[in-house]
Image: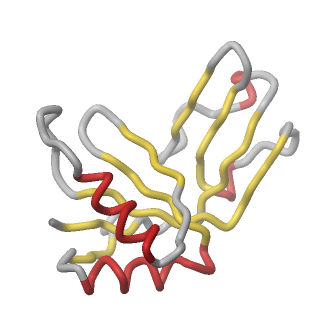
């Protein structure tokens, strides 16, 4: 299985109003609930006013389109990282999964996954 490293440094943050977010930003993940508006976006695009903000995330995506019938793909990856005591912030889209890791643990995470047979490639976009 191939993992594609995202080139952007990412931030996880909360905003009071989603109108603060430029919806043309890529990558962009938004979670809006009754309790919060959480956003993941490139650090350079974070608005000046946030409720909470956590910078220094790096990420990778699982290459290809994952069928909903597939089981355990994300669990296997996060299990390997848990053994290394590396925490993750996981995101899923219709097509695939993304895993964010704090920058200071990112290279160790990639090395642990490569040692378990995952192919690591850099994003061309």
Q: What colour scheme governs how the chains and residues are painted in the rendered image of this protein?
A: secondary structure
Find the residue positioned furthest to the front.
83
Residue located 66% across and 49% down the image = 12
Left or right: 67 in relation to 58: left
Residue located 27% across and 57% down the image = 62
Within the image, what quadrant is residue 19 found in?
A: top right
Q: Quadrant of the N terminus?
A: bottom left
Where 60 falls versus 13 (above or below)? below
What percent of the width, then of the height, locates residue 95?
A: 24, 38
Within the image, what quadrant is residue 38 found in?
A: top right
Left or right: 1 in relation to 8: left
What percent of the width, then of the height, locates residue 111?
A: 37, 86
**How many numbered discs sit on the rendered protein?**
0
Residue located 69% across and 13% down the image = 34
What percent of the width, then of the height, locates residue 117?
A: 17, 79
What percent of the width, then of the height, locates residue 79?
A: 37, 63
Q: Quadrant of the C terminus?
A: bottom left
Taking depth in this image into account, of 124 and 104 the one nearest to the observer is 104
Where 106 falls versus 94 (above or below)? below
Left or right: 3 in relation to 36: left
Taking depth in this image into account, of 109 and 27 the one nearest to the observer is 109
Left or right: 28 in relation to 96: right
Residue located 35% across and 70% down the image = 80
Taking depth in this image into account, of 115 and 67 the one nearest to the observer is 115
Find the residue positioned furthest to the top.
34
Where 35 falls versus 96 (above or below)? above
Within the image, what quadrant is residue 93 found in?
A: top left
């Amino acid at each position: 299985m191939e993992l594609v490293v995202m080139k952007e440094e990412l931030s996880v943050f909360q905003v009071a109003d989603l109108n603060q977010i430029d919806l043309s930003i890529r990558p962009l993940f938004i979670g809006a609930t009754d309790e919060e508006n959480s956003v993941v976006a490139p650090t350079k695009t974070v608005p000046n006013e946030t409720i909470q903000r956590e910078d220094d995330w790096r990420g990778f995506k699982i290459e290809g389109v994952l069928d909903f019938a597939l089981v355990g793909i994300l669990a296997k990856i996060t299990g390997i990282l848990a053994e290394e005591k590396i925490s993750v912030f996981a995101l899923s889209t219709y097509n695939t999964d993304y895993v964010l890791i704090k920058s200071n643990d990112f290279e160790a995470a990639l090395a642990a996954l490569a040692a378990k047979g995952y192919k690591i490639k850099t994003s061309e976009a």
